[in-house]
Image (tube, rainbow, N blue to C red):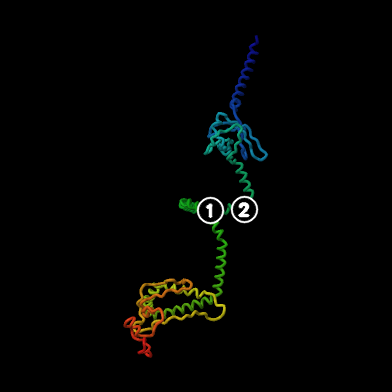
């Protein structure tokens, strides 16, 4: 039987061993050693300064895994290996967005999984490789960039600039505040026009392209305008003389028109019937002038001279007084007949109108016998002999 002292030693050792076992089990359980996990890999341009093994992997704030290790790749990227809960893996779409961020500026990084706006409908697969969408910028990165900017600024010039700014605003706080208030009012008035400004900016490329296409023509117009200006300047004396002559002509014209305005007004009134008649018969006038156009445009003769077509016709009735006195009694409006294009080997027909002499008033189409008695017998009483006094008393 062991001694009481040895028994107490054994009990103490057993108690320490049990305590150590409990601590190890607790640590293992805390680290997830007894939890079944599946591996995932996140490819990122960088992991961040404060990204350690064991960092949390959250989905909408709920832990779904942890970071098992971080691997630096030769291409400068970081491969972040994750251990995810397989039960949660089925709830995550395979196009999930990965965001590496921290709750504070100096806080530890964590991997946040953000469900996309349009889930693919397929769950994440064990071993799948994801690309990160965003990595929070660390404070030291900002400080590094700020240091690089400040290193390019000369301290003495920076001091002079800050001193000049300090002197400029010294004692002008009230004015500066009033300026800021006025600027705020201007911005408040400008804010409603921002949609129009945005639309104008979107249309600016099209307008700029149009101006770019028209630029050569605009430059040519400018050059021509310069040439015109030089010409006007060089001919300024002649231009002055022209203006003076124009003024004199205007004065003379004023005297002429002013002195004869009544006569001009009467002339215009007298021209109205003539112009009305011309307007009514403009079609016939056009037909006649257009009929002469082939003669004007015909090719010249091979030899100098005049070519004419002469024929003999039977005699017609002579002029008789008073029945053949001219008068204006024709009616019926304009007649073009076959004009202005007359067919070959033809002529326009003769239009009989009540205007005085009518060569066919007795129906004679052939040879006429110079016998007044025969005419009286055939046609009845007719007008007297021609007005030629030398023929008075002779047969008609």
**Residue 162 against residue 229 in the figure, above or below:** above
Residue 157 marker: 2
Counting every numbered tag in the picture gives 2
Secondary structure beneath label 1:
helix
- The residue lying toward the viewer, choosing from 161 and 151, is 151
Name the quadrant containing residue 97: top right
Q: Earlier in the sequence, mark 1 or mark 2?
A: 2
Residue 237 marker: none
Give me the C-alpha separation between circle 1 and circle 2.
18 Å
Quadrant in which the C terminus is drawn: bottom left
Residue 287 rendering spot, x and y as whole percentages: 44, 72
**Residue 389 against residue 58 in the figure, above or below:** below
Task: Tell me which residue sits at (53%, 53%) in the image.
Answer: 169
**Residue 353 against residue 138 in the figure, above or below:** below
Mark 2 nearby-residue class (10 Å; few <14, some 14–19, many ≥20): few
Residue 148 rendering spot, x and y as whole percentages: 63, 47
Task: Tell me which residue sits at (47%, 75%) in the image.
Answer: 292
Quick one: which residue is furthest to the right in this view? 74
Decide if residue 17 is in sight here.
yes
Name the quadrant containing residue 220: bottom right
Quadrant in which the N terminus is drawn: top right
- The residue lying toward the viewer, choosing from 61 and 153, is 61
The residue labelled by disc 1 is 169
Residue 108 rendering spot, x and y as whole percentages: 59, 35
- The residue lying toward the viewer, choosing from 57 and 92, is 92
Secondary structure beneath label 2:
helix
Name the quadrant containing residue 353: bottom left
Task: Tell me which residue sits at (55%, 60%) in the image.
Answer: 214
Quick one: which residue is furthest to the top in this view? 1
Residue 384 rendering spot, x and y as whole percentages: 34, 86
**Residue 333 against residue 140 in the figure, above or below:** below
Quick one: which residue is furthest to the bottom in this view? 390
């Amino acid at each position: 039987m062991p001694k009481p002292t040895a028994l107490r030693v054994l009990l103490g050792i057993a108690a320490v061993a049990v305590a150590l076992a409990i601590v190890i089990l607790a640590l293992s359980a805390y680290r997830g050693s007894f939890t079944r996990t599946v591996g995932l890999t996140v490819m990122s341009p960088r992991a961040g300064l404060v990204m350690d093994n064991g960092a949390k992997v959250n989905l909408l704030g709920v832990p779904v895994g942890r970071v098992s290790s971080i691997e630096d790749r030769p291409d400068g990227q970081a491969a972040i290996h994750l251990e995810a809960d397989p039960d949660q893996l089925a709830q995550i779409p395979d196009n999930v967005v990965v965001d590496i961020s921290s709750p504070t500026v100096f806080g530890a990084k964590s991997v946040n999984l953000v469900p996309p706006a349009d889930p693919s409908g397929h769950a994440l697969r064990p071993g799948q490789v994801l690309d990160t969408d965003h990595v929070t910028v660390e404070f030291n990165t900002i400080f590094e960039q700020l240091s690089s900017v400040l290193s390019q600024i000369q301290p003495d010039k920076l001091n002079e600039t800050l001193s000049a700014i300090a002197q400029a605003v010294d004692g002008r706080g009230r004015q500066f505040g009033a300026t800021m208030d006025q600027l705020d009012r201007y911005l408040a008035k400008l804010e409603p026009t921002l949609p129009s400004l945005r639309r104008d900016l979107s249309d600016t490329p099209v307008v700029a392209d149009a101006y770019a296409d028209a630029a050569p023509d605009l430059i040519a117009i400018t050059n021509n305008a310069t040439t015109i200006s030089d010409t006007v300047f060089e001919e300024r004396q002649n231009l002055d003389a022209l203006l003076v002559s124009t003024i004199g002509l205007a004065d003379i014209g004023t005297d002429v028109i002013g002195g004869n305005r009544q006569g001009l007004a009467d002339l215009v009134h007298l021209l109205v019937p003539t112009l009305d008649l011309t307007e009514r018969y403009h079609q016939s006038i056009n037909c006649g002038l257009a009929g002469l156009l082939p003669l004007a445009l015909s090719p010249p003769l091979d030899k100098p001279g005049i070519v004419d077509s002469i024929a003999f016709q039977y005699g017609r009735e002579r002029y008789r007084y008073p029945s053949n006195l001219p008068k204006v009694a024709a009616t019926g409006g304009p007649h073009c007949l076959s004009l202005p294009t007359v067919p070959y080997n033809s002529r326009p027909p003769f239009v009989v109108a009540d205007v005085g002499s009518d060569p066919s008033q007795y129906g004679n189409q052939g040879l006429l016998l110079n016998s007044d008695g025969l005419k009286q017998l055939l046609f009845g009483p007719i007008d007297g002999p021609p007005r030629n006094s030398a023929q008075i008393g002779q047969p008609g």
